[in-house]
Image (cartoon, rainbow, N blue to C red):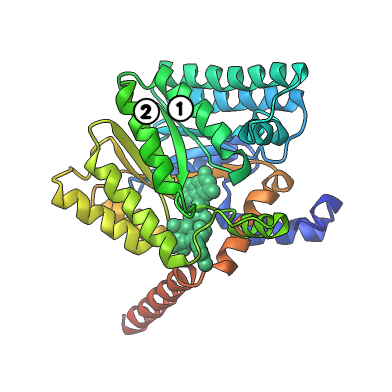
Amino acid sequence: MNTFGHLKLFVLQRIQRWLFKPFYAGTTLQESEPTVAYLSNYDVFSYLNYATEDCWDEKQFEVNSQIVQKLLLHAATTKNIPFSVCKATSFGHKHLFQKINAQLSLTKNEKHAFKSVVNRFRECCKVAKEHDVGLLIDAEEYNMQLAVDQIVMDLMKEFNTSKAVVYNTVQLYLVDGNERLQQMHYRAKTESFNLGLKLVRGAYMQKERKRAQKLGIPSPICKTKSDTDANFNQAVAYCFNHLSNISILLGSHNEYSMILATEIMKKNRIKSWDERVWFSQLLGMSDHISFILAKKGYNVVKFVPFGPLEKLAPYLTRRAEENTAIVGQTSRELALLQREIKRRSIVAKAL
Ligand SMILES: Cc1cc2nc3c(=O)[nH]c(=O)nc-3n(C[C@H](O)[C@H](O)[C@H](O)COP(=O)(O)OP(=O)(O)OC[C@H]3O[C@@H](n4cnc5c(N)ncnc54)[C@H](O)[C@@H]3O)c2cc1C
């Protein structure tokens, strides 16, 4: 897809459309509506994301901010869309965040560009707060994430006064993931605001490892999958123990982590429909988790991407890479589907 996607070959486009259909809701906002309606039939909420990855110029960054604001307004006026989402690199140049992350001083032009980035975020947060829609801010690559954390924490201080509106993302495949989370919590406590957190394992493992190897530095990623799992589960437990000023959205397809979260909720007497706790999976992935949790009364929201296929390419390729890199959950999902198909055909034959 990355190699030939730009050629716009008719057959290739048809194949891509067929192949990726389960993972995106259509090319326009209007086309995404049936997906949102379908999910809501099963008490599963949605949040829409227009593909805005790999942007490079100021005009496009400005357009992206307008798109997020439009989606926030759409969420406010549509049933079953409690959140919107955005990412730092769709509001500003990657190199800018990397420079701030590395504590390098910015040129006059860069300072100006950075001010615009913060303004774009602030405009979105204002709309989110005014219309009571949560705004999730994605985590990206390690060499820019501290800069993003800094911006998002400042926004939380400004907008998360009475409840969490702005959510930062913590990647628990990072060795220092829990340390970062607890530092964020410390700041929220001492400066009296609500901490909104999306907890994920992390999507850039192979890229991060390659970069560290190239630079000859230790990888920021946990050495093993079980280390990442332990980090994630520790973060989940920590947040549930501090719900008085933390709201969480657990973005994961890991069955064990999801079950663990529900067990902690039961143990801590947290209601399944508590508005501070959300479970989230990507459209087309782990429906067996989303639908069962929703049926049991938990708050579940699907990440629903839409947009032209060529723009969705980086997102869809990441999902494909991730699915081939993961041993376990994806094959488990496939096995469950096969078992269900077999069960239904036995029932059909018996009738
Ligand atoms: C709603 C939602 C929002 C998301 N938002 C973001 C985001 O903002 N930023 C982001 O980076 N990702 C995001 N992701 C992706 C997420 O980080 C994971 O890549 C993906 O969900 C797979 O992890 P899992 O918990 O679902 O499942 P699992 O299958 O249990 O875990 C797979 C993950 O474990 C880790 N892992 C795998 N092998 C190893 C290994 N050998 N050593 C160490 N760690 C390993 C990797 O992180 C891998 O992605 C999001 C996912 C969801 C569902």
Name the spot of residue 98 as percent of width and height, x first.
67, 36
Mark 1 residue crowding within 10 angstroms, few (<14) / some (14–19) / many (20+): many
Q: Is residue 151 left or right of residue 339?
A: right
Residue 77 visible in the displayed image: no
For residue 351, above or below residue 223: below
For residue 183, above or below residue 62: below
Label 1 C-beta lies within 8 Å of the nearest ligand 1 atom? no
User: Depth check: 125 or 210 in front?
Assistant: 210
For residue 306, above or below residue 229: above
| Label 1 SS | helix
Residue 120 visible in the displayed image: yes
Residue at figure coordinates x 32%, y 57% from the top left: 258
Residue at figure coordinates x 64%, y 36% from the top left: 102
Q: Would you say the residues marked 2 and 1 are in contact, meaning their CB atoms lie under 8 Å apart?
A: yes
Q: Which amino acid does label 2 sit on?
A: Arg
Residue at figure coordinates x 84%, y 56% from the top left: 9
User: Which residue is labeled 1 in the image?
Assistant: 153
Q: What residue type is labelled 1?
A: Met
**The quadrant where residue 103 appears:** top right
User: Depth check: 74 or 103 in front?
Assistant: 103
Name the spot of residue 159 as percent of width and height, x first.
41, 19
| Label 2 SS | helix
Label disc, if present, on residue 187 of the rendered structure? 2
Dot placed on the residue nearer the N-terminal end, 2 or 1: 1
Name the spot of residue 52 as percent of width and height, x first.
66, 37
The C terminus, quarter of image: bottom left
For residue 218, above or below residue 68: below
Label disc, if present, on residue 240 of the rendered structure? none
Mark 2 residue crowding within 10 angstroms, few (<14) / some (14–19) / many (20+): some
Q: In this view, does 117 lie to the left or right of 249?
A: right
